[in-house]
Amino acid sequence: MKLQRNGRSKALAIGAMALVSSLSLAACGSDENNNTTASGSGSAAPAAAINCGSKPSALVAAGSTAQGNAIDVWKTNFGAACSGATINYGGGGSGAGVQQFTQGKVQFAGSDSALKPAEVDASKAACTGGQGINLPLVAGLISIVYNVEGVDNLVLDGPTTAKIFDSQITKWNDPAIAALNPGAKLPDADIQAFHRSDDSGTTDNLTKYFAKTSGGAWSYPASKTWAGKGGQSANGSAGVSAQVKQVKNSISYAELSFAQTNNLKSAAIATGAAKPVEATAANAANTFAKAKIAGTGSDLALTLDYATKDEGSYPIVLVTYEVVCDKGNKADTLDTLKAFLTYGASDAGQKAIGEKGYVPLPKELTDKVNAVIPTLA
């Protein structure tokens, strides 16, 4: 998420504690329900809390599975409040979502990585007179999820995790893992690592973390496409989570919401701080407190510090962007698109997904998003 276009990055000054004061890390539904309309299950927000716009229509979108549970919450609440408006979110991963967006097949795409320059250029064909921009709406963290009998409080660091996912470390009782977990009863068992089979922004953010923290153990460029050696693959956040839940001595990576849904354990990360950092929304909020805007104009792409050593700052985080046209949106769906994005960026929308394991974005950032949405044309 580092679409750097100039040096005008500026810190997002926020109070991390304020972000999480209302969080309840409850479990929620999986992204296997993404191909539904806005009339899904869940508690609906009061109609008065949502401005539906004047021309309700059907939106079609696709992309990130990491935000699938958030979209499920939003479309349920939005659909209950806005008669005639539906949101069909197809998931499929960030890469597929961006591709469909640049081909003009969806009104917005969810991507856990900001558009690359080539993708911005490609978007101009779909955005007549404009281009794709990144609007951050869903913040979360990537859990290193594991299923190892007898190990309840696993600690990992950047180099060790990178080596595990590249098949350089293949046993759970490897000395590198043992050194991080003194006293733990690590089994003499083969590690079964699962990675994403689809092009994934979650993979992109994980490998950005490896690039910053592995000390060269991860020799591949950060990418949405998996490049590590060995392991097995599964589709989507729900797919890898399901595999870890079923397979003994396994490990993978998934957004916190999916870890909670599947009752999976998440490793704490040794960052160089005084103690390992737990995978919690509160600790992720401490990292988002120092996020910077890297985009220009109406583009709100962010940079994040994956190598943070600050106390209580969880390093493996992601922001999911709703990728939209700044100009050239379809006239018949623009009103509903603006209304839906406005609800997602609202205090009510952010609180609703905060109760499902996501991290409410800092108000300074949602204010910027809410300033851009009315300008979409």
Image (tube, helix red, strand yellow):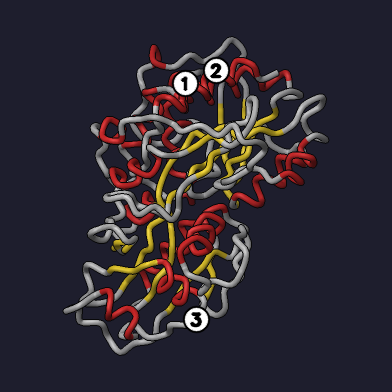
Q: Amino acid at mark 3?
A: Ser
Instruction: Tell me the number on the disc at residue 346.
Output: none
Question: To which residue does mark 3 refer?
Answer: 167
Residue at 55% in and 47% down = 112
* Secondary structure type for disc 1: helix
- In the rendered structure, the answer to whether residue 160 lies left or right of residue 21 reads right
10 Å crowding of disc 2: few (<14), some (14-19), many (20+): few
Residue at 73% in and 18% down = 331
Separation of residues labelled 1 and 3 (CA atoms): 44 Å
Image position, residue 151 (x, y; %): 23, 74
Which residue is most to the front?
7
Q: Are marks 1 and 2 in contact (CB under 8 Å)?
A: yes
Residue at 26% in and 37% down = 23
Question: To which residue does mark 1 refer?
Answer: 367
Residue 236 shows in this picture: no
10 Å crowding of disc 3: few (<14), some (14-19), many (20+): some
Q: Amino acid at mark 2?
A: Ala
Separation of residues labelled 1 and 2 (CA atoms): 6 Å
Image position, residue 206 (x, y; %): 49, 59
Residue at 34% in and 80% down = 176
10 Å crowding of disc 1: few (<14), some (14-19), many (20+): few
Q: Amino acid at mark 1?
A: Asp
Question: To which residue does mark 2 refer?
Answer: 371
Q: Earlier in the sequence, mark 2 or mark 3?
A: 3
Image position, residue 322 (x, y; %): 58, 35
Residue 148 shows in this picture: yes
Q: Are marks 2 and 3 in contact (CB under 8 Å)?
A: no
Separation of residues labelled 2 and 3 (CA atoms): 46 Å
Toward which corner of the image does residue 235 lie, by quadrant? bottom right
Q: Earlier in the sequence, mark 1 or mark 3?
A: 3
